Image (tube, rainbow, N blue to C red):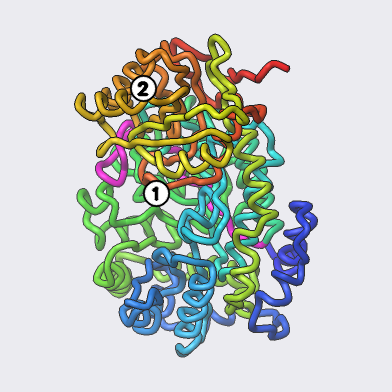
């Protein structure tokens, strides 16, 4: 698996992106520790480890913060007392803080008997801004990249994510999402998926896996063997899918097969019961899925990491302790523990107790620890534990990255409907634009104001389901405007209040364009709107501001040519691949 990770990182900003950012800004300044590379033998390390040290390597724990935003005493105890081998951070606010955060936990890990380095991980599905909110580069969600229909953008998104992540001290990313989102009512995947067609998801997953490998960041396609046809959010309940084995093979497994062929090093499990394989247990706990299907049928030899074990799909049905042992016996290598410190204690304790009682074999433990150590050796984590906060601040969120992100955003923004030439709005006219909606109105209005010469005012309802009184107030404010933009947001079915808001603003007689900032299906609830734009900018579970997609949408509204084509079907209205362009 060794592919020269350090060399790969050194060329990421020039060869991978064509951006005028000197390689030295990342490679020479970013690594505070410049010890010569030494070849390490995972078997020699394994031979020296105690049971406690082995089990600690198999638990990935979320960190906890003190008042200064840096890891606290409980985190130190996780690393030094529980001997945890990998972490997913909470959400450090800035790149510099993230780098200091990484350095502190690595120092704690180094100050142990064996001094094994940590694998630092993050959930960077739409760039590092997913976890580090300020000073990083917001990238399109996967569905926005799917709408752009160009593997080049998927590769660039991975390269930018890797450059920023590595600069901040991260080695491991829980992306790309390899789910084929065949169910429009899916409450948790949605715009996190590249789309509803297997071939599109397959192509872009492969592009990102290869790009991450070149850039020196571990990627993790998820959620195996597929979360795209579920009706239940696994954070809140236990989903099950009813399709047969032929559908699984034809629709949901190909992106994972392709990722394995491309050399992916880790795959994340789904807390989903796939009845065609195991009608009783979710994939995370099923030997039939992890050992039989993933290891056996698909031939995957890399690292299997679970999704978070404190999610209700697992915790409420089996309990964290029992499920942790079941997952490892099923074939998982690393247990993701994202709860309080006591949860980490339970995970480690459950595995140690099972090992000592013979419920977990030593061979099974050694198999997993061997994979973990090999990955740390392959990615040179021993010799590159520490990073420069100053370099992290320089690399993350730089203007070159932002420029490329905006190009991706415009390429994915989809003009779905444009009757009577409502769009584009004239950017140089002094017309008054009114922006209304139920979510993220202020950041979107900010970008509208930047794109328009005229006045811009805005209004947002108190909830995502506006009341009749709120709609009356929005209409009153719209009467002083020349043109109206209304942002709608849904994580499933659009709340009726938002559809009523669109219809009421249309009734004012002003030109109205609706902007779907989340799922692209909102127009089903207000099909007579004359202009409709989909941005795929906001995920189903966490309502976060994606300023890049707001900026891209504003540019398209005021005349920049939209590039997107629907990566899904809007039933009864628009087919997969539909997308309009401005004439002239």
Q: Is residue 486 magenta?
A: no
In the figure, 354 relative to 493: above or below?
Answer: below
Q: Quadrant of the C terminus?
A: top right
Density class for disc 1 (Cα within 10 Å; few <14, some 14-19, many ≥20) is many
* Left or right placement of residue 251 versus residue 507 in this view: right
Q: What stretch of residues is rendered in magenta?
A: 216-240
Real-space CA distance between mark 2 and mark 1, rounded to the nearest whole angstrom: 62 Å
Q: Is residue 275 visible?
A: no
Mark 1 highlights which residue?
A: 287
The image shows a total of numbered marks equal to 2
Residue 3 in the image, given as x and y percentages of width and height: 73, 63
Question: Crowdedness of circle 2 by 10 Å Cα count: few (<14), some, many (20+)?
Answer: some
Give the residue pinned by disc 2: 479
Q: Main secondary structure of the magenta part?
A: loop
Q: Secondary structure at mark 2?
A: loop
Q: Nearer the viewer, residue 295 or 256?
A: 256
């Amino acid at each position: 698996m060794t592919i020269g990770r350090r060399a790969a990182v050194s060329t990421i900003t020039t060869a991978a992106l064509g951006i005028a950012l000197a390689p030295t800004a990342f490679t020479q300044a970013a690594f505070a520790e410049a010890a010569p590379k030494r070849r390490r033998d995972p078997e020699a390390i394994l031979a020296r480890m105690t049971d406690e040290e082995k089990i600690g390597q198999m638990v990935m724990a979320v960190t906890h913060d003190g008042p200064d935003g840096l890891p606290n005493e409980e985190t130190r105890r996780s690393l030094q007392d529980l001997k945890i081998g990998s972490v997913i951070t909470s959400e450090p606010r800035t790149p510099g803080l993230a780098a200091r955060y990484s350095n502190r936990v690595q120092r704690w890990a180094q100050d142990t008997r064996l001094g094994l380095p940590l694998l630092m991980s993050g959930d960077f599905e739409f760039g590092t801004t997913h976890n580090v909110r300020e000073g990083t580069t917001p990238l399109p969600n996967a569905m926005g990249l799917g709408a752009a229909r160009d593997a080049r953008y998927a590769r660039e998104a991975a390269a930018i994510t890797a450059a920023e992540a590595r600069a901040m001290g991260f080695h491991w990313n829980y992306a790309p999402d390899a789910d084929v989102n065949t169910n429009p009512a899916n409450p948790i995947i949605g715009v996190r998926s590249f789309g509803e067609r297997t071939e599109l998801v397959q192509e872009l997953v492969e592009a990102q896996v290869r790009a991450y490998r070149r850039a020196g960041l571990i990627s993790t396609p998820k959620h195996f063997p597929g979360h795209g046809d579920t009706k239940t959010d696994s954070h809140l309940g236990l989903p099950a899918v009813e399709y047969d084995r032929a559908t699984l093979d034809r629709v949901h497994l190909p992106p994972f097969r392709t990722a394995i062929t491309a050399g992916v090093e880790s795959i994340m499990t789904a807390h989903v019961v796939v009845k065609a394989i195991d009608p009783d247990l979710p994939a995370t706990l099923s030997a039939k899925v992890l050992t039989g299907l993933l290891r056996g049928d698909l031939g995957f030899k890399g690292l299997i990491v679970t999704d978070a074990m404190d999610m209700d799909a697992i915790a409420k049905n089996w309990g964290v302790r029992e499920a942790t042992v079941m997952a490892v016996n099923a074939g998982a290598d690393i247990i993701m523990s994202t709860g309080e410190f006591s949860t980490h204690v339970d995970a480690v304790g459950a595995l140690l107790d099972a090992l000592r009682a013979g419920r977990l074999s030593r061979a099974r433990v050694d198999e997993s620890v061997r994979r973990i150590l090999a990955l740390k050796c392959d990615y040179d984590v021993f010799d590159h534990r520490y990073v420069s906060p100053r370099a992290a601040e320089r690399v993350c969120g730089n203007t070159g990255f932002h420029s490329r992100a905006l190009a991706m955003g415009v390429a994915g923004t989809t003009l779905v409907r444009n009757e009577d030439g409502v769009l584009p709005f004239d950017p140089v006219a002094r017309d008054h634009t009114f922006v209304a909606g139920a979510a993220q109105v202020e950041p979107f209005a900010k970008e509208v104001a930047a794109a328009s010469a005229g006045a811009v005012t805005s209004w947002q309802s108190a909830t995502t389901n506006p009341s009749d009184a709120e709609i009356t107030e929005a209409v009153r404010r719209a009467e002083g405007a020349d043109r109206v933009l209304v942002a709608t947001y849904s994580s499933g079915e659009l709340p009726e209040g938002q559809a009523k808001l669109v219809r009421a603003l249309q009734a004012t007689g002003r030109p109205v364009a609706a902007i779907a900032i989340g799922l692209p299906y909102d127009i089903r609830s207000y099909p007579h709107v004359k202009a409709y734009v989909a941005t795929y900018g906001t995920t189903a579970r966490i309502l976060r501001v994606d300023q890049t997609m707001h900026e891209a949408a504003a540019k398209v509204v005021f005349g920049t040519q939209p590039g997107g084509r629907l990566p899904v079907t809007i039933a009864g209205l628009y087919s997969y691949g539909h997308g309009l362009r401005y004439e002239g």
